[in-house]
Image (cartoon, rainbow, N blue to C red):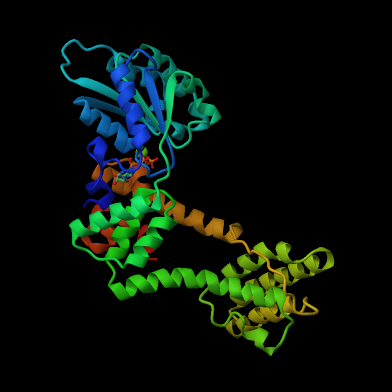
Amino acid sequence: MTTWAEKYRPIYFEDIRGQEEAVAKIKDFIKNFPLKKRAIILYGHTGTGKTALAHAAAKETNSEIFELNASNLRNKEKLKETLKPAIEQQALLKKGKIILIDEVDWVMGEDRGGIQELSELIEISEYPMVLTANDAWTKKLAPLRKKCEIVELKDLDYKIIKDVLIKILRKEKKFIDNKILTEISVKTKGDLRAAINDCQTISKLSSEDQIKTLFDERNKEEDILDALKKIFKLKATNETLRTFDQIDMKTDEIILWIEKNIPLEYQDKKLAKAYELLSETDLFNGRIYKQQYWRFLVYENIFLSYGMASLNKENKTNFTKYKKPTRVLKIWMNNQKTIQKKSISEKYAKHSHISIKKAMKEFPIIKQLINSNPKIPEELDLNEDEMAYLKG
Ligand SMILES: Nc1ncnc2c1ncn2[C@@H]1O[C@H](COP(=O)(O)OP(=O)(O)OP(=O)(O)O)[C@@H](O)[C@H]1O
Ligand SMILES: [Mg+2]
């Protein structure tokens, strides 16, 4: 059970794509150790090759790697206990050694003592230390910065991402439509791990389903934006009543979109009226669900469409750039999801001896792997809620 991102992880410097500057800097850092700094921070967005680069540096210099991560920084004393012996000169060690402290910025607020301890240990390290972080400039890392060389890993260009995907697909003998590959490469915004994961997911679908998935995603957003334009810009007519009929979205979510965009469209009295209408719909919605008067659902749509459009005394022609909602329900829904996702990841991580963070990052693939074999959920001892989440 490996993911493509794992299977195709870079081994040597030349496998690390699009990070020539960072590669040159880490080479230089190791070559000059300990003349300048004793540690280097590799920072950059997720999935750009930080951890991979640290491992490649060890491989290229024939060094062994000693690896810790944020969870080891939690306890100051324990950190010292583990790290100190590792950074001291070992007479018998013929190979070189690189000390990797992965994801240092993942230490929580209350664990900052670990950062202080780490920064003291850097000064006496007999071996080059490589630290990785998404953000090197957060306040909590301040004590480390002056002791480290700081090197950025760039968001990968979509052309590089696409090229990596094509090569992987060739090796896997899988096919994805060129348009979809471009879409994945652009949408993942420089995160190659995410791109590889998306690619693995979508490669399992038939080419028809691949295209359908792509367009469903796109259309859903276009549809709701179109609907918003109708109810916010046009006078109410009979046509208005059908605005939400064709949209594949639950009323709860439609309400969120409307709520988010009301202030972009109305001011003063109209703003107040629009909110009033929305809260009435919300109340109504609650009542329908509680008393199960399903046939009233249709009125709810009327409130939202006709009601909202009645605020427009005439058709407007101005352009408004609508926003995506982020609030309440969505956050709540996501939190619910996160809880299940976390507990499943924990179980999977334990079972497969990988870190929980890694399992969380590779979740879409792990989800597929678990779903693909009925024995796995049993092996992982997943409960009903976790199973429901996986099937949803
Ligand atoms: N620059 C790159 N060149 C080639 N492959 C890459 C590169 N960056 C990421 N990858 C792919 O993505 C996977 C994850 O990369 P890596 O673990 O190095 O990311 P990271 O920058 O450490 O991310 P995070 O901040 O989430 O820890 C790799 O196994 C590899 O498949
Ligand atoms: Mg990493």
Give the x, y percent position of residue 40: 39, 25
Q: Is 186 located above or below residue 138 in the figure?
A: below
**Depth check: 344 or 145 in front?**
145
Give the x, y percent position of residue 282: 67, 70
Residue 304 visible in the current orientation? no
x 61%, y 66%: residue: 257
Residue at the farthest bottom position: 238
x 74%, y 72%: residue: 277
Q: Locate residue 355 relative to residue 119 in the image: left or right.
A: left
The number of numbered discs placed on residues in the rendered structure image is 0
Give the x, y percent position of residue 148: 43, 21
Residue 355 visible in the current orientation? yes
Q: Quadrant of residue 55?
A: top left
Residue at the farthest right position: 269
Q: Quadrant of residue 123?
A: top left
x 65%, y 79%: residue: 300
Q: Locate residue 257 relative to residue 155 in the image: left or right.
A: right
**Depth check: 114 or 346 in front?**
114
Give the x, y percent position of residue 230: 66, 77
Q: Is 384 located above or below residue 236 in the figure?
A: above
**Depth check: 263 or 21 in front?**
21
Q: Quadrant of ligand 1?
A: top left
Q: Quadrant of the C terminus?
A: bottom left
x 24%, y 45%: residue: 352
Q: Is 332 located above or below residue 127 in the figure?
A: below
